[in-house]
Image (cartoon, rainbow, N blue to C red):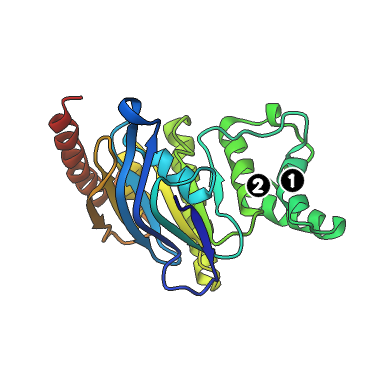
Amino acid sequence: MTSTTLVPEGATTAVALSGVTKVYGRGADAVVALDRVSLDVAPGEFVCLVGASGCGKSTLLNLVAGLDAVSGGGIHVAGDARPGLMFQEPALFPWLTVGANVEVPLKLRGLAGAERKTRVAELLDTVHLGDFARRRPHELSGGMRQRVALARTLALDTPVLLMDEPFGALDAMTRDILHDELERLWTARNAAGKPLTVLFVTHNVREAARLADRIVLLSSRPGRVIWQTPVDVARPRRIDSAEVATLAAEVTDRLRAEVGRHGH
């Protein structure tokens, strides 16, 4: 059994999956969630994982994050810190202010008080919430809470960001705005020479076509990489553009064929 291994920054791949297999249970009750998944993600690349429910997308992110151990194969992640992981729910501490929520990972990193205060202000300005540091999570909209969660994840200052359907529970307009915000942050990091690699799980093929440099399709359980394609659509993109719609239709057709093949 092997697990996630951290390698120095500057590697030619930011995330390298080699024959990753994950099995839950033993014997007759064993369930193979992932079967020999191999995938290389370049530094600064934005990769979207799509597939039917239960195909192992979230399991794969948990393995890359080091929250679970693989049953076989290996995972190598560039950088000296674990990847940042952002979930569908913001999971903020309700008793803390917005600023204090963002400060939590900075405390865990051991930053001094003055440096933490400055960094919190910078991160909240980055996600356009500079005036909300003293608010509590319940005072914010769903989209604003997700921005706080994004700022908190960025506070880890990791070169790899894992996102597990982070915008799936939001309305279409808020989701579209956050697509723009995420792309802006990702583009700025890459332009500044600090590549931000994103591995993004979604059920929404339009979202994948809107955001990704590359789309990777996983098979129904057990999850395997069965198809992938670069997204050759100029940025910035609109989710309702003809080019995005055309690519989304192709991905949908392949996804339907895979779901139909398994009869669910």
The amino acid beneath tag 1 is Val
Q: Residue at horizontal 48%, vertical 31%?
A: 170
Question: Where is residue 131 drawn, in percent x and y?
Answer: 74, 44
The answer, for residue 238, to whether it is visible in the render is: no
Tell me the quarter of the image containing the C terminus: top left
The amino acid beneath tag 2 is Arg
Question: Are circles 1 and 2 on residues that touch, CB within 8 Å?
Answer: yes
Q: Nearer the viewer, residue 93 or 240?
A: 93
Q: Residue furthest front?
A: 27
Q: Tag 2's secondary structure?
A: helix
Say which residue label 2 marks.
Answer: 152
Give the label on residue 104, or none: 1
Q: Residues within 10 Å of mark 1 (few under 14, many from 20)?
A: some
Question: Where is residue 50 drawn, in percent x and y?
Answer: 31, 42
Q: Tag 1's secondary structure?
A: helix
Q: Is residue 254 left or right of residue 81?
A: left
Question: Where is residue 100 drawn, in percent x and y?
Answer: 77, 42
Q: What separation in Å lies between label 1 and label 2 (alpha carbons)?
A: 8 Å
Q: Is residue 145 left or right of residue 240?
A: right
